[in-house]
Image (cartoon, coloured by chain):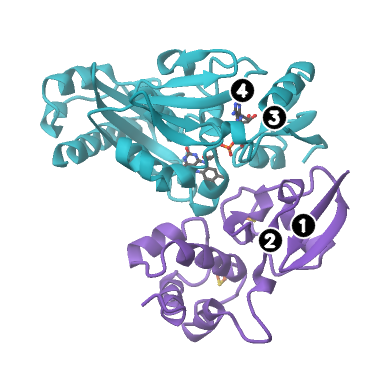
Amino acid sequence: MAKVEITVNGVKHAREVEDRALLANFLRDELGLTGTHIGCDTSQCGCCTVHVNGQAVKSCSMLAVQANGAEVVTIEGMAKNGALHPIQQAFTECHGLQCGFCTPGMIMAVAGLLKDNPNPTDEEIYHGLEGNLCRCTGYINIVKAVKRSAELLGGK
Amino acid sequence: MYQFHYVKAKSLQEAGEFLAAHPDAKLLAGGMTLIPTLKARLAQPSHLVDVGGLAELAGIEVKDGKLRVGAGARHREVAMSAVVRKAIPALAELAGVIGDPQVRNLGTMGGSVANNDPAADYPAAVLALGATVVTMRREIPADDFFQGMFATALEPDEIVVRVVFPVPKRAAYAKFPHPASGYAMAGVFVAENADGVRVAVTGAGPGVFRWQEAEAALGKNLSPAALEGLTVEAEGLNEDMHATREYRANLVAVMAKRAVAKIAGK
Ligand SMILES: Cc1cc2nc3c(=O)[nH]c(=O)nc-3n(C[C@H](O)[C@H](O)[C@H](O)COP(=O)(O)OP(=O)(O)OC[C@H]3O[C@@H](n4cnc5c(N)ncnc54)[C@H](O)[C@@H]3O)c2cc1C
Ligand code: FES
Ligand code: FES
């Protein structure tokens, strides 16, 4: 077992975890933040994407102990004071989801993409979301939602 | 995942001593290969020694005319580094097409070369550029370093500290990625170095290899036309559910032409 202190969505949590605990399981099972989804065993689907110290990572492929001392933001940390985050707003407006399973990871990946590139082209969006799979939408409306997010965030 | 003990290394020396004292311990860098491997229960290390974020493994710089990339440099840093883009733009470009953004945010140069996945991208650049892998105890030329599928010249307790790349006159990388994982089905790195042209192929064979016939042809004429009619032997290449060995052999020739076209276009 290992002692960790991880700040999640602005709140510091001190816990004892198994050395082998994955960050995704820590968030879901220890903290009850089940917005972070686990969609695969192969580190490919991106449903589990969260930000660790400002960068998008797959929380199913990082140990909780590796995040000791870090600042983590999950989908639950995106809306502020009851108002959706602009990226969440854009996904709603553009119908960027159907079943919604990939959506939390998609939104965290989009947040990472737009931080590096506030106004991406279609090509840049495809490349930027290569780590996220969606079984429902065919991606068309997701790409629209990314463009709308860029507008709402003032990239254009 | 099997149980293991996690150890956060405070220095390279501490990590090295720990590995020497614990034969079943493994280094953990970005974890982008190791953690999926552990999740699939394909390995059972006693300890993971985390060298992620160690200052001694950080840094990207040009020194004595060579590009030095710390083993701890993340793929993202290499892709975005102004120093790499100026010295060897093809290396920055290669780093930018490894896996996906989340993988690039964690995966490292040292982890990738030490792992020597037959479909990894960096080994092609390291071999084509004639780079040197520097460990805590010696310097290993690329030609001696890669030894076939997941095999390298590293001792079990040897730690890669940096990779030193001579700056080529021109270089380019072309990759046909697997559509789901992003790994190379075939990737070809072509470099015009001070001492001639080198062509390294990843993804197609059991390990990265040089395509000497193409090197000879391109040494005389660095243009896609020089590769016309040249083929790699399909015998011995990888065959799996994604592609036959004949298909991979063809991909190698196509990727080589694309890489040379990029060079010639510059
Ligand atoms: C979904 C996905 C897609 C991917 N796609 C690609 C791709 O397209 N192309 C590609 O090239 N790679 C790809 N990768 C692999 C990725 O690039 C890894 O980051 C890389 O192979 C390993 O680096 P790491 O820092 O994560 O190493 P780790 O996983 O931490 O370690 C890998 C191995 O190297 C050893 N090691 C680590 N650091 C050192 C060191 N300094 N000295 C000695 N040994 C060391 C470890 O003990 C371990 O055995 C992908 C990975 C995933 C999960
Ligand atoms: S759960 Fe699929 S990548 Fe993490
Ligand atoms: S909306 Fe169902 S997986 Fe993307």
Q: Nearer the viewer, mark 3 or mark 2?
A: 3
Which residue type carries mark 4? Ile
Residue located beneath label 4 in the image: B159
Say which amino acid is labelled 3. Ser
Q: CA distance from mark 4 to mark 1?
A: 29 Å
- Chain in purple (letter): A
Circle 2: residue type: Val
- Quarter of the picture containing the N terminus of chain B is top right
Q: Label 1 to label 3, Cα distance in Å?
A: 23 Å
Q: Chain of mark 4?
A: B
Tell me the subunit letter for badge 1. A
> Which residue bears the numbered disc 3?
B11
Residue under label 1, please give it: A6
Residue B15 vertical position relative to residue A101 in the rendered view, above or below: above
Mark 1 residue type: Ile
Residue at mark 2: chain: A
Q: Can you name the residue that lies furthest to the front here? A: B64
Q: Mark 1–mark 2 contact, CB under 8 Å?
A: yes
Q: Is residue A131 left or right of residue A1?
A: left
Disc 4 C-beta below 8 A from ligand 1: yes
Residue B6, image x, y percentages: 79, 37
